[in-house]
């Protein structure tokens, strides 16, 4: 209860709209006010015990003025509240020093008072208030010295026992005021230093991330330009190949040239197999037939098609179904193409030595277009050769492949990534060299048509962003 009350007093005047740089100073003013109040109350009983009625009554005036500081903070008169703290002590200490005399040690209380302007106004933007505070404190000390000279008769006669006790209390009070004030100030500065260090660490990490992002963007830009060039070339090849195919099909009607035209058609088919993914990769207007479908059924159909290939290479292919909701929204043919591609990649990664491919299906939320959505996560797990970190970063980049052949131009996983993104899904990959790879596909279970949000420009950093 006492702790909660002290916290309440410390936060008087702090609201949601209070600037962060002011919160520390407001709380500091309140905390010093609490310390002075706690230190002043015992003096009332001390002065009363020694029959120093005037000194005891002044304690009540001091208490009232310090309570006024909380009121001023409450109404957001922060600088005025600080000045009341400094003024109250600057008036009270000369009075007690003159009234009780030098031997009482009341003048020692100027030590914590002289620290207050520095604690209340530590920054350059409030240096004028700091100067005013020091001026008040030093003026008070001069007034005390002058009053001792001009009004020595104002000092009450006290015996040595009382003076010794008062001097001891003054020393303890001085120590009790200085240490908490310095400790509060020190803690505030340490917290500020820690926050600054954390901010610097975050900024450094953000700079590193931005540099990595810029390098990745430059690489993607190069690949995108290359992809556009290849697509243009593929378009130029397409029409002559169609004419060649038509001519070869006519030539098949003649017995004497049938074998020759079969070879021509096989070559045309091979070229079409290479050109087709080139033409489709950058097709941003590709049409999908979105509809609800059972993802497990689609996976089982693909597994049946892949069984023979797996058995011939002694690969065990299995499905782990952990779904409570198996209906997703998308184009089943396009998603089937994704699954075929991923299973084929897993088979190639394992090779002819035998292994295991597991397709694990679970329900899991993911972030799509900056929104958290319900979804299905399909993990394609193999214990094949795996990839090193460098190759793993490039697996979704067009024309990059660790197993390029004459018929594989490195567009397989790029097309997979494009289809998943067109479905507003998510694709992730993790791999360990010589241990295996996990490709994770996230698809929405929502029955809503995926939103066609405008694509963000990935290459919007200026060339000199990190220079200078």
Image (cartoon, rainbow, N blue to C red):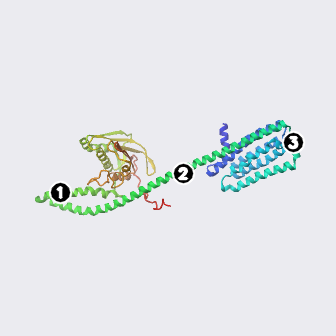
Q: Which residue is mark 3?
A: 156
Q: Earlier in the sequence, mark 3 or mark 1?
A: 3
Judge from the rendering whether residue 206 lies leftward or rightward of residue 146; answer left or right.
Answer: left
Residue 144 x, y percent position in the rendering: 81, 49
| SS assignment at label 1 | helix
**N-term mark: 3 or 2:** 3
**C-alpha distance separating marks 3 and 2:** 60 Å
Q: Measuring 81% from the left and 47% from the top, which residue is drawn there?
A: 94
* Residue on which the image places disc 2: 200
**Label 3 secondary element:** loop
Marker disc for residue 263: 1
For label 2, the SS is helix
- Image quarter where the N terminus lies is top right
Badge 1: how crowded within 10 Å, few (<14), some, or many (20+)? few
- Residue 240 x %, y %: 23, 63
Q: Earlier in the sequence, mark 1 or mark 2?
A: 2
- For the point 63% across and 45% down, the residue is 187
Q: Quadrant of residue 376?
A: top left
Residue 113: x %, y % from top left = 74, 47
């Amino acid at each position: 209860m006492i702790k909660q009350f002290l916290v309440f007093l410390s936060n008087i005047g702090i609201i949601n709209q209070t600037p962060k740089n002011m919160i520390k100073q407001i709380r500091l003013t309140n905390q010093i006010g609490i310390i002075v109040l706690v230190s002043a109350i015992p003096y009332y009983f001390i002065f009363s015990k020694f029959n120093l009625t005037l000194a005891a009554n002044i304690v009540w005036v001091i208490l009232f003025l310090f309570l006024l500081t909380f009121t001023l903070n409450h109404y957001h008169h922060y600088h005025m509240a600080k000045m009341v703290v400094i003024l109250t002590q600057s008036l009270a200490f000369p009075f007690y020093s003159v009234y009780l005399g030098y031997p009482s040690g009341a003048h020692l209380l100027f030590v914590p008072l002289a620290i207050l302007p520095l604690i209340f106004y530590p920054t350059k933007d409030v240096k004028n208030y700091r100067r005013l505070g020091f001026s008040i404190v030093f003026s008070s000390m001069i007034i005390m010295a002058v009053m001792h000279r001009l009004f020595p008769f104002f000092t009450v006669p006290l015996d040595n026992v009382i003076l010794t006790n008062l001097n001891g209390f003054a020393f303890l009070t001085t120590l009790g005021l200085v240490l908490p004030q310095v400790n509060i100030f020190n803690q505030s500065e340490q917290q500020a230093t820690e926050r600054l260090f954390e901010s610097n660490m975050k900024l450094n990490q953000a700079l590193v991330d931005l540099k990595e992002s810029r390098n990745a963007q430059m690489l993607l830009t190069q690949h995108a330009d290359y992809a556009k060039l290849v697509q243009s070339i593929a378009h130029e090849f397409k029409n002559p190949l169609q004419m060649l195919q038509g001519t070869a099909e006519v030539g098949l009607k003649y017995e004497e040239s049938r074998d020759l035209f079969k070879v021509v058609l096989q070559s045309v088919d091979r070229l079409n197999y290479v050109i087709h993914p080139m033409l489709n990769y950058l097709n941003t207007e590709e049409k999908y037939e979105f509809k609800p479908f059972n993802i497990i059924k689609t996976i089982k159909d693909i597994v049946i098609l892949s069984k023979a290939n797996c058995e011939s290479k002694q690969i065990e292919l299995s499905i782990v179904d952990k779904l409570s909701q198996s209906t997703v929204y998308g184009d089943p043919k396009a998603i089937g193409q994704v699954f075929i591609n991923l299973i084929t990649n897993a088979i190639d990664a394992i090779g002819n030595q035998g292994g295991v491919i597991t397709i694990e299906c679970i329900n899991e939320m993911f972030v799509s277009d900056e929104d958290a959505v319900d979804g299905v996560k399909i993990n394609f797990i193999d214990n094949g050769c795996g990839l090193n970190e460098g190759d793993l970063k490039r697996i979704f980049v067009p024309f990059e492949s660790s197993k390029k052949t004459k018929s594989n131009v490195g567009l397989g996983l790029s097309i997979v990534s494009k289809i998943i993104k067109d479905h507003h899904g998510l694709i992730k990959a993790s791999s360990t060299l010589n241990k295996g790879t996990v490709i994770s596909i996230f698809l929405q279970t929502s029955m809503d048509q995926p939103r066609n949000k405008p694509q963000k420009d990935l290459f919007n950093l200026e060339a000199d962003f990190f220079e200078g």
